[in-house]
Amino acid sequence: MKKAASLKEFVERVDESKKKNPKDLSSDQDLTIAIMNLISIEEHLIFSGAKTGKNKFYDMVQDIRELRKNLMLQVIPTYEGEVWCISKHLLASSMRLMEVGTKQQSMGNKDKAYQLFSQAYDLYCLFWGLNMNLVDTKDVKWANDDVEKTERIAQALQSTRIPHKEETGLFGKIKSVVRKAVDCCIE
């Protein structure tokens, strides 16, 4: 696929692909939130088993894991390389950042919470970008290939952002597309 010349062209391509792909993205978005919670349940069962010494918690992990895998197949039916595992970890990391953000918010640390919520959304958008084939891995460079750009991205990720502000770079482009493509309010 030829690289889009502008963000507008990129969004137009996504809109066109939605017309060709009848996949219900709002439903898939709900599934990803369920998957996040199932990953969290797996973790809690393992920690509960370790903390209590009761194997019954460990015994439940396999059933939860199978359910999570089956649901992931509905969102990621085909993939190459490590995309499946990367996707799982992007969702898990996004969920954890949301949880840490809500704890920071309840402690009155709103700026820190907003930063964590923004980072959680970045990871969530990266998940969609990866699984909607919006991220072309041939364009990904090692950090030392473009240190200046990497530093700008890192600074942007660390700053608190205003929602829906026009952003640049990989996360900005993906977030813009995801906002348009994954609209949970479309029935």
Image (cartoon, helix red, strand yellow):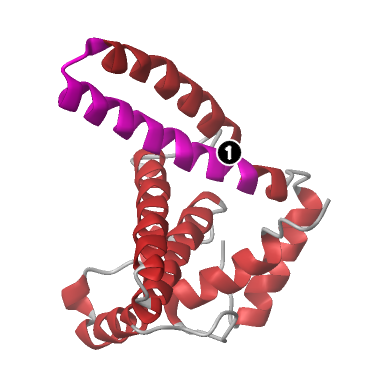
Q: Is residue 131 above or below residue 79?
A: below
The answer to whether 82 appears left or right of 145 in the picture is: right
Tell me the quarter of the picture where residue 170 sits: bottom left
Q: In the image, which residues are magenta?
A: 29-55
Who's the residue at 64% across and 68% down the image?
A: 179
Toward the viewer: 151 or 27?
27
Residue lying farthest to the right in this orientation: 187
Q: Quadrant of residue 40?
A: top left
**Residue 75 shows in this picture:** yes
Question: Measuring 51% from the left and 59% from the top, which residue is drawn there?
Answer: 129
Q: Position of residue 184 (x, y in %)?
A: 71, 56
Identify whether 29 is placed above or below 123: above
Give the residue number, with chain letter if any, for mark 1: 75
> In the picture provided, is 79 more to the left or to the right than 145?
right
For the question of whether residue 135 can be seen, the reply is no
Decide whether residue 44 is among the magenta residues: yes
Residue 185 in the image, given as x and y percentages of width and height: 77, 58
How many marks do you count on the picture? Answer: 1
Place residue 16 in its image quadrant: bottom right
Q: Residues within 10 Å of mark 1 (few under 14, many from 20)?
A: many
In the rendered image, residue 104, in percent from the top left (x then y), is placed at 34, 68
Q: Position of residue 69 (x, y in %)?
A: 46, 26
Residue 33 relative to residue 55: left or right: right
Asked whether 76 or 68 is in front, the reply is: 68
* 151 in the magenta segment: no
**Above or below, comparing residue 33 to residue 177 in the picture:** above
Q: Amino acid at mark 1?
A: Val
The residue located at (27%, 80%) in the rendering is 150
